[in-house]
Image (cartoon, coloured by chain):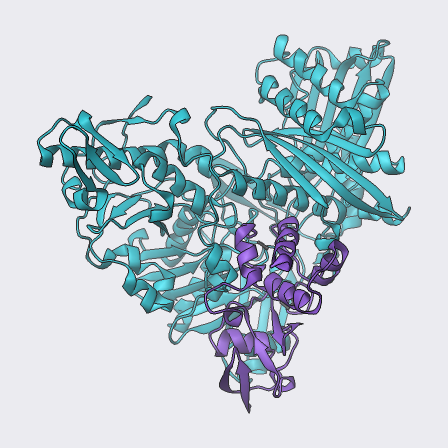
Chain colours: A purple, B cyan
Amino acid sequence: MAKFNLKVNGKIRKVDIDPTTPMLWVLRDHLGLVGTKYGCGIAQCGACTIHLNGTAMRSCMLPVSAIGNQEITTIEGLSENGDHPVQKAWLEHDVAQCGYCQAGQIMSAVSLLKNNPNPSDEEIESAMNGNICRCATYTRIKAAIKTAAKK
Amino acid sequence: MATITTSYNRRSFLKVSALSGGGFLLGFSMLAGFKPAEAAKLPADWNELNGYIKITSDNVIKIMSPNPEGGQGVKTSMPMIVAEELDVEWKSIVVEQAGLDTKHFTRQFIGGSQAIRQGWKSLRTAGATARQMLREAAAKQWQVAVEEITTEAGKLYHKASGKSATYGEMALEATKIPIPQEVKLKDSKAFKLIGTSQKNIDGLKIVTGKPLFGIDYQREGMLIAMIVHPPAFGLKFKSFDASSIKKMPGIKDAFPIKIFRDDYEKQFFDTTTFGEVVAIVGNTTWEVMQAKKAIKIEWETFEGYTQNRNMLGRKLTEKIPAGLESTEEHSAKMIAMQGKEATLRRKDGDPETAFKNAAKVIERTYTGPFLAHNCMEPMNFFAYVTEEKAELVGGLQKPEFTEQALSARLGMPLEKIDIQMTRLGGGFGRRSYAHWLIEAALISQEMKAPIKLIYTREDDMTAGIYRSTYSATYRAALDANNNLIAFHVKAGGIPESPLYANRFPAGAVDNYLAEDWTIDSNITIGSFRAPRSNFIAAAEQSFLDEVAEAAGKDPITFRLELLKRAKENPVGKDNDYDPTRFAGVLELVREKSGWEQLKSKRSLGVSAYFCHDSYVAHVLDLEMKSSEPIIKNVWCAIDCGIVVNPEAAKNMAEGGIVDGIGTALFGNMTFTKGVPDSNNFNKYRMIRHKEAPKNIEVYFVENNIDPTGMGEPAYPPVFGALANALYKATGKRFYSQPFQTDLGKM
Ligand code: FES
Ligand code: FES
């Protein structure tokens, strides 16, 4: 067990846990932030995507001990009322089917647009390729990213 | 206007005025448990007009959505149908997911693309009945004839006197009105809401990461449980050493559980691969995952056995053979079966003679592997079982069946079991087999604590209940004028046959023969998006393409000619499909894709199929980039009758198309000595962003036919469209799924 002060969605959160615990389970089991999803546990599906200092990161293989001072943002902290341009674009295109993968997709998309405000189709595909959608909503995701890029 | 006699009785139309605190309404809302503030905002004085509709005096209108939501959009489209007949504005209503409630609702399940088709009449009747009761309440209060009361957007009007009231103002009075024996339903031409696109009702919650899914559910004092199942099909539990893990941090206990009682006769959906598994319980997911890796368990092989199954009254005997099976031996066995005698399913004319006299005979064999469902949300369930009651929360497709199985296992009457349904992180058939719900309940009972059972992705992918592996051999006979004079299909699988003997081209060919066979296996299978159609459509639609080519005909014209024959002079009586509607989607997709102009310039593949009472045709356009297909366009034409929520229906069709392309290219579960060769997404390839089509266009045939299936029908035909387009691009036919294997050799 070890104590950590984590910066999550702009607040300091204290946990006392096994330092090997991946951030995914720290968020879900210890901090009650269940928007970040478990899909594979081996960095293959992207359901667990969060931001570390604003950059997309798979949280399922990221031990809490590696976080240090870096700022964590989860889907819950992306905006106050779901009004981040990417979230709005997702609603406009009615992207979700089951919805399970979408928090991870949105976190990846936000990170992409931050680094590349006007991505080409190929750049969108590459940046998003680590995020599986079992319901296969890929065409809508791409359209939503393009809409968000215009805003 | 259709007049419909209400079939509800008092019991199913429970009228509870001023249901205190919303009664069971708020009781089952998992969000109420999470966010008291949101729950508190909801008013308490619900006037329940019927199981679907509650209205407060200040005119908050709530419509219950009876069926589980797993991405098919029923939580939006089903309430839309109620709202249409009730005559309320969509933006003014609140939609809530109902719990399992057999008193109020029928068919609360996902499967067979049936929700809208089956619910169409009852949902409309529920809306129309409530509207009628509100009108009668107003007529009574205003002392006028009920016929003079009109409604619009949730308000009642009496034109002559200028009186008006909101539904809310009349709601309490309306609950005192006897249920009308007959109500009039709207003419479909008068629909205002049905046929308009409405956004996913949970959209905002999804994009903000709200706790919507079973895996998100939390309860004070809840423990986390996981199971360990045998590592191979053909093995069973022998013994284990709990001491190896009991001292690990956070671990509470580990014990074996038996999913069914030994004397239990299994029903429809009571499939479980492993009858006995080891449960590990601890404080947190990560801790239990560590214990799962460390635990020492001994497994042993089992003897073959038979088990009886009650399929809604029909008794089946299933043979479960012993042994550790491998894909190689499966393939050899399937090839051998194609040479043996099979069971006759349909015969028209004299196929033997026709084949003997044919100018040309084409014979091809198609195969498809076992497939894992791989729902994005791994299987999980919350359970809290005490002596008094069993409380269960999570996502499942067949709650009514599962409740019965659980009742038998716990020896607890149905009334004491409460199943609350969350959103499903995908179903695709997998969540029909809810053995994990029973496992969760047994673990909670043993621990005397609330627990949440979570399958790891590896557990989820290796626990069986796959789609079968299949094989089909087709033969077609052409006469000297290139007319199709005989057609023969012989299909089978391990352990299930994919054959639909009465589907197209049955009915369009004078001499027709359909036969099938099966091989027993201890690898378990279950429904998988568009069961059996998902393979047989691929095989048949690829084969027809090759037959058309041999006959020197355009593949669309060839199919249309056969459909014309089936319409004008059908062979046999039991043909499943309507040739006119079938031809309609082919004609529509031909027009929308610009088939005639593009077919000589691009690599186009066409396919059309009928299943779940709907008709779908696709044209797929691709280019090869070394050995990888780049799919440029898919045009899709659908006839599923009236489309309730067009944009959502398009989303479903797009998903079906992309999912089908992915499965055809990559989907593959193989076995080595009983062990599944893939246990996570690094070894089981799923379609990803790069491989999805660049453009998809979906068109609906406009008609006034009652709505039919939408969740599945777009899926099966896309396999064939892809295979046929690949042939155009590469000059090579693709007979074995996944196509990736042959593409890799190019
Ligand atoms: S759960 Fe982390 S990538 Fe799949
Ligand atoms: S919406 Fe279901 S997995 Fe993406």
Left/right of residue B344 with respect to residue B277 in the rendered view: right
Left/right of residue B61 with respect to residue B373 in the rendered view: left
Rendered-image quarter of ligand 1: bottom right
Quarter holding the N terminus of chain B? top left
Residue at the outermost right position: B746
Q: Is residue B24 visible?
A: yes
Q: Could you say where residue B93 lies in the image, as x and y percent from the top left?
A: 34, 48
Left/right of residue B130 with respect to residue B528 in the rendered view: left
Count of numbered labels shown in the rendering: 0
Q: Write down the quadrant of residue B27 in the picture.
A: bottom left
Residue under the image location 30 percent in, 59 percent down: B26
Q: Could you say where residue A60 lies in the image, as x and y percent from the top left?
A: 63, 73
- B441 vs B199: above or below: below
Residue at the outermost bottom position: A2
Q: Nearer the viewer, residue A89 or B383?
A: A89
Q: Nearer the viewer, residue B206 or B679?
A: B206
Q: Could you say where residue B482 lies in the image, as x and y percent from the top left?
A: 83, 13
Q: Is residue B544 visible?
A: no
Residue under the image location 67 percent in, 24 percent down: B586
Residue at the outermost left position: B143
Residue under the image location 69 percent in, 47 percent down: B370
- B156 vs B446: above or below: above
Q: Could you say where residue B406 lies in the image, as x and y percent from the top left?
A: 41, 54
Q: Write down the quadrant of residue B230 in the picture.
A: bottom right
- B641 vs B246: above or below: above
